[in-house]
Amino acid sequence: MADAAPGRSDRNMAPAGNGAAIRIADLAFRWPRQPAPCLEIGEFAVAAGERVFLHGPSGSGKSTLLGLIGGVALPERGRIEVLGNDLGRLSGRRRDRLRADHVGFLFQQFNLLPWLSALDNVLLPTTFSALRKARAAVERSPREEAERLLGRLDLAAADWHRPAGMLSIGQQQRVAAARALIGRPEIIVADEPTSALDAERQQLFVDLLLQEAAAGGTALVFVSHDHRLAAHFDRTVELAAINRAAETGAAA
Amino acid sequence: MKAVLILAMKGALARRGTLGLMLVSIALATALLLAVERIRHDARQSFVQSVSGVDLVVGPRGGAVPLLMHAVFRVGDASTGMRWESYRQIATHPAVDWALPLALGDSYRGFSVLGTTPDYFERFRYGDRQSLRLADGRPFTGLFEAVLGSEVAKRFGHRPGDRIALAHGSGHIEDGAKELAGPGHDNRPFTVVGILAPTGTPVDRSVHVSLESISALHVDWVGGAPAPGLSLPAAALSKFDLAPKEISAALVGLKRRADAFRMQRHVNELRDEPLMAVLPGIALDELWRTLGLMERTLFAVSALVVAVGLAGLAATMLAGLAERRRELAVLRALGAGPGALCLMLLAEGLFVTAAGALAGLVLLAAGSAAAAPWLLDQFGIVLGQRWPSVNELALVGAIIGTGLIASLIPGWRAWRMSLADGLTPRT
């Protein structure tokens, strides 16, 4: 919104103004055949390498927001920039390309292709993006990089070649994290990736993710309803606070 | 795009159980459709080949198709015959180049016995105007000599010099059921003197003897059965007049084909005996018209089988799509566009259909190789082993095309789903 309160936008701006990973301005989104927007964000930005905890209960429009950042949905109004690219001005193909090259996604569950091995799942982004393949191959081969990440995320080597569908949920989530990390994308978006894990493993998982993101200089947007996980992040943002549509109760 | 297609292949491989079943059903449907088409084509071909050199078939008045079936294909029985004088009259007509008398009615272990003149081996033409060739031995010259068609000789392992006993009647009898073949001519064994090379026509399944031999066989018969207590020694037969009195039909070749209709009218108008002349091509056309409805029905049924197979493929893919919805979202998050996902399903459907259709072709080749002897035996259809014809390839193309169309539905669904779901599948 043009007349957004300055205070609010300041609070949600990324500390480092220049190299913003994600920048949202004056955005509104409405699903087809719905009377009111489910998402209205005045200002929100994530700096390069910044690790943001986005707190939002279910129904606060976070899935929609992730879809917008991923470029699979377009806002009805406003701007959304990923690495300086205005997604609204890009073709669908370019947005797909941008997502493949620069954004790693991590979902609640079912992140993997169950019939591919764990290792092949991790390598998937390198088959979709030449850029991520090149980056994964900077120090070693993409395969070795995948193995290194799986090792870092505590997946036993014996499990690397098993079909992903045979792994436990916890193991699957670590494979998914390795997949999001491979090829050092500028942004990782994680949507409740720990909800299927038990409490003890949740923190462990988040810490591993934070470490690897930091090591890769990757901006991390971690969405969760669980405040306890927020501790080690650079910043916590309440989705309900930045989404004005939620206040009117029209959020999806 | 390429990455998506490679993944589609890997995914298809992972679901090989289900897709394999679909592939098998499409292969069977394809083989069925092609088999119907091939048998139809080859049956016609066999029929046309058998009469290619004959301009007219002459026989007792009746239906054109029954006459053709009886005289050329040895199928069915003729109720009456034609008199030898009438045959001579036609054979000596100035427009007639050659005429071959046919006396049918006896059989040898299920194969028809054809009484004719030695001219038969000179004059008869089949296929592409080819003449008969002896693989072994010589044509018959005297009484009780027989020339076997290749199939007859092969079946019973006969060689020149073997002695065979004919039976009255034309029952399609296999070995060991001789009593059904009517009374025997056991007291007048024939000597095999020659064996014909294979022709792929009913000639292969005939035993050729002279008209005089046929007369001699029945000389001591009364009213279609051996006269009781009367059995003449073969030597005594020469005292009888063995000149043929009646034959079943005649094949006629004209000097000029253009005379066919004129000659036909001439035969049909003969005063002495009610005869008819049939142009084989026209009689065959009539036969095809009769069979056309059945053929079309058969074709429609097998086309339906293909349609059911492809509908099954589409249904299976659609059903699988619900499970794969998450997969689609994963691929979407990895940078695949909705078009790529649609393409992935199209590729999968196309692959299964194409592989199924090719497997069907292989199945057809194997099946026709296995069934060819039986078809030849039972129906006289020569099923050739050959590369798929243009017609068959067009059918295969149509099947693959229809498969592509069938997989458009799941492809379109995947497109819609991936747009609606974005990165978070709603399942």
Image (cartoon, coloured by chain):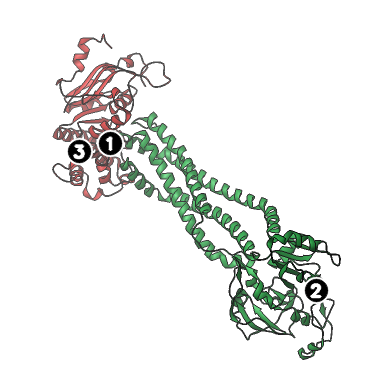
User: Callout 2 environment at 10 Å: few (<14), some (14 to 19), or many (20+)?
Assistant: some
- Name the residue rendered at 71%, 74% in the picture: B114
Q: Nearer the viewer, residue B37 or B250?
A: B250
Q: State whether residue A119 is above or below residue B414.
A: below
Q: Colour of chain A?
A: red
Going from N to C along the chain, the mark reached first, 3 or 1, is 3
In percent of width and height, residue B10 lies at 34, 47
Residue A197: image tag: 1
| A30 relative position to B209: left or right | left
Work out whether residue B49 can be spotted.
Answer: yes
Q: Nearer the viewer, mark 3 or mark 2?
A: 2
Q: CA distance from mark 3 to mark 2?
A: 98 Å
Q: CA distance from mark 3 to mark 1?
A: 25 Å
| A229 relative position to B20: left or right | left
Occupied quadrant, residue B257: bottom right
Occupied quadrant, residue B167: bottom right
Q: Colour of chain B?
A: green
What residue is disc 2 on?
B84
Q: Nearer the viewer, mark 3 or mark 1?
A: 3
Occupied quadrant, residue B201: bottom right
Q: Nearer the viewer, mark 1 or mark 2?
A: 2
Q: Chain of mark 2?
A: B
User: Callout 3 environment at 10 Å: few (<14), some (14 to 19), or many (20+)?
Assistant: many
Q: State whether residue B265 is above or below residue B208.
A: above
Identity, as a three-letter code, of the amino acid under mark 2:
Trp
What residue is disc 3 on?
A183
| A238 relative position to B231: left or right | left
Q: Nearer the viewer, residue B258 or B164?
A: B258
Secondary structure category for the residue under label 1: loop
